[in-house]
Amino acid sequence: MPERMTLDLDILILAQDAASIYNRLKQAGGRQISELSIPGSQWELADGTFLDVLILDVFSRSPRRYGKPGNARPTRIRSVVKG
């Protein structure tokens, strides 16, 4: 099978690390472009590279749209980052 050519880089992060990683991306000159259709967001980095940040909840071992596991009311990662 030929190598798949893409224009972006994908990373997988833990849900509890999302706020810290998003802040570091902003400090490094990154700009959040949009939310993905799966848990995570798309970024444009200072050098023009596009980065997809995928969020993984290790307790369920599957991507989730909501923040910290065990919350009585789910909190979207986006609101945690902006807050």
Image: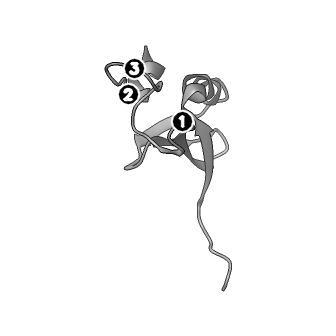
Q: Which residue position is annotated with label 3?
A: 71
Q: Residues within 10 Å of mark 1 (few under 14, many from 20)?
A: few
Residue extending furthest toward the top:
83
How far from the left and from the top, in percent, is residue 76? 37, 27
Quarter residue 7 falls in: bottom right
Q: Which residue position is annotated with label 1?
A: 59
Secondary structure beneath disc 2? Answer: loop
Mark number, residue 40: none
Q: In which quarter of the image is the N terminus?
A: bottom right
Q: Earlier in the sequence, mark 3 or mark 1?
A: 1
Mark whose residue sits in front, 3 or 2: 3
Give yes or no for contact between labels 3 and 1 (Cβ–Cβ under 8 Å): no
> Front-most of 10 and 45?
10
Secondary structure beneath disc 3? Answer: loop
Cα distance, mark 1 to mark 2?
17 Å
How far from the left and from the top, in percent, is residue 48? 62, 47
Q: Residue at x 54, y 32 (%)?
A: 15
Secondary structure beneath disc 1? Answer: loop
Q: Residue at x 47, y 41 (%)?
A: 41
Amino acid type at image mark 3: Asn
Mark number, residue 76: 2
Q: Which residue is drawn at 44% across and 42% down?
A: 39
Is 63 placed left or right of 17 in the picture? left
Q: In this view, does 6 lie above or below 43?
A: below
Q: In this view, does 1 lie above or below 50?
A: below
Q: Specify whether residue 22 is in view.
A: no
Q: Specify whether residue 34 is in view.
A: yes
Q: Earlier in the sequence, mark 1 or mark 2?
A: 1
Q: Which residue is drawn at 43% across and 13% down?
A: 83
